[in-house]
Image (cartoon, rainbow, N blue to C red):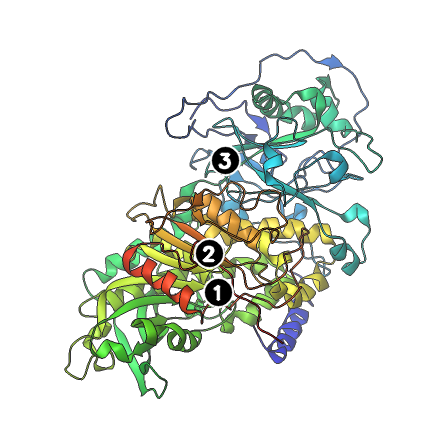
């Protein structure tokens, strides 16, 4: 993590930045708040071996009762209509318009005046968001329900996700293209966030988080029904939604223009057994297509490697230092050339050079000189080392390779190499801090991480290619033979695990990856990570309202998908992206992790179809009603599988709120030095086998005595 001095600089930068201003039939088309037609044409997709689900559509020419009484709707041309908060509920197809050029036939259409503003009155610029053809595949659903009591309502909490699929569940997430319900948990924004912002309970968001990602390009219908307050009384729907639900004609043109699309959503709910009379609110949103989520980085990858052809990347070794550490021969430092797609020579704060392309496809701007650092083991002198591309931790640097190489490289004959994961590296701390003062600039982070992915792919090619690193004496034995073997893997820890699934999903040179203490997505992770504490201070300084913060998290996730696991997980282990092999993944988590909360690791595991090594935890350790709900058990070893291993270092269970675990010792980095963990990881990388290193018992290590 950054030093206090760097953080002080970051605060100053924020203050300076904020001192100035700056395929079945489609649903009936309706006018959106942006003034354009609104609809979705996602194809019917059925699970393998099932009968395709035929989506219900609303009956035409619905008779309406004549009535008045719906209050005037504020800013109906640019806002949602069912709460007094412009962007809530979010996401919603109210914030889209028709666009026949996209895969979803939609385009996000957010008005600048509708976007959150910081204390200087500067609204987030929606330009980059409006290039999307839908919303995040991991979208947290955010809305406002004054007075709701989730316990009285019976909503599924994070420790009882299975309840979300109960027939009478008060909250429903329905995939309208398959007819399947999507598991989730519901929570109210933690009270401590309200206190820190000096806000009352009326600024407390209701948050619904999918327990596995939505399918790309699908239409999702959200339904809230039979919601109750603390006394157990039912909470009444807004007059605007009641007019839709009860088929009452209103005098509000904006509401009437939404009626056909909402009736279509209600018909889909009815087909799934959710009756309209019980509804408090229901609405649809569409998930961004695979193309929209990945086309930028896939273009960059394919363009860069087309330019490279059958050659190795050009590189320069700037230093080769012999090591006195046991098992380590030398540390090699240098640079390698990568096609650059960023503005301003790729400096911190740069963005993809894509202003002229409506879909954001970038153009090459030159050559980026990426750094590298490699740790070569002494054992490579007698047997070529296994090559590893390593992904470092939060806002860290390539220097982390030194400690990792020493910890695991020497004893396992690994040539460990890394490069700065720009966008989220130490050099990016200043721009990241500025972004927290004006989220308009957030795109720089995922733009730069996409360039980082291409950099890591080129590093992998330099390691693997016969004319790459192995041609330099720094990577050769005393006999002049190569100290680098032919195999190549990815290993990433923490941030390197959160970004590692993404870069692995587009990688063509490796097919196995170890993701240590990873998760997805950041919109879930931030409030639950101790690492965000100091950055939250910067965010709250300019966006003090807690509801605005949650809306902001949901918004930035739409862009962050391009640079972390969340946007790629649906294509990591199955349904691979074009020109890309499917991957085998081993996930390792530390129970009660303070930095990357286990719930985000669980969502990743469910989404990519990992099996959890069983037995998992000792009885009583998890507070969940069904620990690892929805994740298939892995009980026979060795196994060639996508696996999820939970290790218990004795840390107390995490809280059930969207707050960090602060109890006990943080186990986040404790697995690195364990011989059992190293055996688990290296056996998987070298053979694809998941082995049992815990003797048919829960994997656990006693806490270090104090």
State the quadrant of the C terminus. bottom right
| In this rendering, the label closer to the viewer, 3 or 1 | 1
Q: Nearer the viewer, residue 103 or 125?
A: 103
Name the residue that disc number 3 marks.
106
**How far across and how far down the image is residue 245, in percent?**
70, 22
Residue 289 visible in image: yes
Look at mark 2 in the image and give the residue it sits on.
563
Compute the Cα span from label 2 to label 1.
9 Å
Q: Pinpoint residue 615: horizontal percent, then vertical percent.
A: 48, 50
Mark 2 or mark 3, whichever is nearer to me: 2
The answer to the question of whether label 2 and label 1 lie on touching residues, with beta carbons closer than 8 A, is yes
Of labels 2 and 3, earlier in sequence is 3
Mark 2 or mark 1: name the one nearer the start of the chain.
Answer: 1
For label 1, the crowd category at 10 Å Cα-Cα, with few meaning under 14, some 14 to 19 and many 20 or more, is many
Residue 69 in the image, given as x and y percentages of width and height: 82, 23
Q: Is residue 423 left or right of residue 234?
A: left
Q: Nearer the viewer, residue 682 or 52?
A: 682
Residue 423 marker: 1
Separation (CA) of disc 3 from disc 1:
29 Å
Q: Quadrant of residue 459?
A: bottom left
Can I make out residue 359 in this image? no
- Label 3 crowd (10 A; few <14 / some 14-19 / many >=20): many
Residue at horizontal 63 percent and vertical 23 percent from the top:
274
């Amino acid at each position: 993590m950054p030093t206090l001095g760097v953080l002080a600089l970051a605060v100053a930068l924020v203050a300076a930045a904020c001192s100035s201003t700056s395929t079945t039939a489609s649903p009936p088309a309706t006018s959106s708040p942006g003034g354009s037609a609104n609809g979705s044409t996602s194809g019917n997709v059925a699970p393998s071996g099932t009968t395709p689900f035929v989506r219900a559509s609303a009956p035409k020419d619905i008779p309406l009762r004549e009535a008045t009484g719906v209050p005037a709707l504020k800013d109906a041309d640019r806002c949602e209509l069912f709460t007094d908060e412009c962007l809530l509920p979010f996401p919603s197809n109210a914030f889209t318009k028709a666009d026949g050029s996209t895969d979803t036939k939609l385009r996000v259409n957010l008005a600048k005046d509708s976007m959150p503003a910081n204390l200087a009155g500067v609204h987030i610029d929606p330009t980059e968001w409006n290039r999307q053809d839908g919303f995040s595949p991991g979208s947290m659903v955010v809305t406002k329900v004054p007075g709701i009591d989730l316990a009285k309502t019976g909503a599924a909490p994070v420790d009882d996700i299975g309840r979300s699929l109960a027939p009478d569940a008060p909250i429903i997430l329905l995939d309208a293209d398959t007819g399947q319900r999507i598991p989730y948990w519901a929570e109210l924004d933690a009270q401590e966030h309200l206190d820190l912002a000096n806000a009352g309970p009326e600024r407390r968001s209701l948050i619904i988080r999918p327990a596995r990602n939505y399918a790309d390009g699908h239409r999702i219908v959200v339904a809230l029904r039979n919601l109750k307050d603390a006394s157990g009384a039912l909470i009444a729907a807004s007059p605007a939604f009641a007019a839709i639900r009860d088929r009452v004609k209103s005098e509000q043109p904006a509401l009437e223009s939404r009626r056909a699309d909402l009736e279509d959503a209600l018909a889909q709910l009815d087909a799934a057994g959710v009756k309209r009379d019980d509804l408090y609110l229901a609405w649809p949103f569409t998930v961004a297509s695979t193309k929209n989520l990945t086309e930028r980085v896939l273009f960059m990858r394919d363009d860069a490697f087309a330019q490279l052809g059958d050659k190795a990347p050009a590189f320069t070794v700037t230093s080769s230092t012999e090591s006195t550490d046991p098992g380590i021969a030398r540390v090699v430092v240098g640079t390698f050339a990568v096609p650059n797609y960023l503005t301003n020579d790729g400096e911190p704060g740069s963005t993809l050079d894509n202003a002229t392309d409506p879909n954001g496809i970038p153009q090459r701007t030159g050559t980026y000189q990426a750094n590298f650092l490699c740790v070569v083991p002494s054992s490579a002198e007698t047997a070529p080392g296994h090559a590893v591309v390593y992904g470092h931790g939060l806002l860290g640097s390539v220097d982390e390779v030194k400690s990792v190489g020493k910890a695991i490289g020497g004893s396992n004959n690994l040539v460990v190499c890394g490069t700065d994961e720009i966008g989220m590296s130490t050099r990016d701390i200043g721009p990241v801090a500025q972004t927290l003062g004006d989220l308009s600039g957030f795109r720089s982070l995922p733009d730069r991480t996409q360039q980082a992915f291409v950099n890591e792919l080129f590093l992998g090619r330099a390691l693997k290619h016969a004319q790459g690193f192995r041609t330099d004496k720094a990577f050769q034995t005393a006999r002049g033979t190569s100290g680098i073997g032919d195999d190549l893997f990815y290993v990433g820890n923490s941030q390197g695990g959160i970004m590692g699934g993404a870069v692995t999903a587009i990688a063509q040179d490796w097919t196995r990856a170890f993701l240590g203490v990873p998760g997805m997505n950041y919109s879930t992770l931030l409030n639950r990570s101790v690492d965000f504490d100091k950055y939250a201070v910067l965010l709250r300084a300019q966006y003090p309202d807690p509801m605005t913060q949650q809306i902001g998290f949901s918004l930035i996730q739409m862009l962050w998908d391009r640079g972390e696991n969340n946007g790629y997980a649906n294509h990591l282990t199955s349904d691979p992206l074009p020109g890309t092999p499917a991957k085998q993944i081993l996930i390792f988590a530390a129970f009660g992790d303070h930095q990357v909360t286990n719930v985000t690791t669980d969502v990743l595991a469910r989404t990519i179809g990992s099996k959890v090594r069983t037995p998992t935890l000792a009885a009583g350790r998890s507070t969940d009603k069904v620990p690892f709900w929805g994740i298939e058990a892995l009980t026979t070893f060795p196994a060639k599988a996508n696996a999820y291993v939970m290790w218990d270092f004795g840390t107390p269970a995490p809280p059930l709120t969207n707050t960090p675990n602060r109890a006990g010792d943080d186990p986040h980095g404790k697995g690195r030095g364990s011989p059992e963990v190293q055996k688990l990881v290296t056996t998987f990388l070298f053979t694809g086998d998941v082995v049992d290193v815990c003797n048919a018992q829960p994997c656990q290590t006693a806490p270090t005595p104090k």
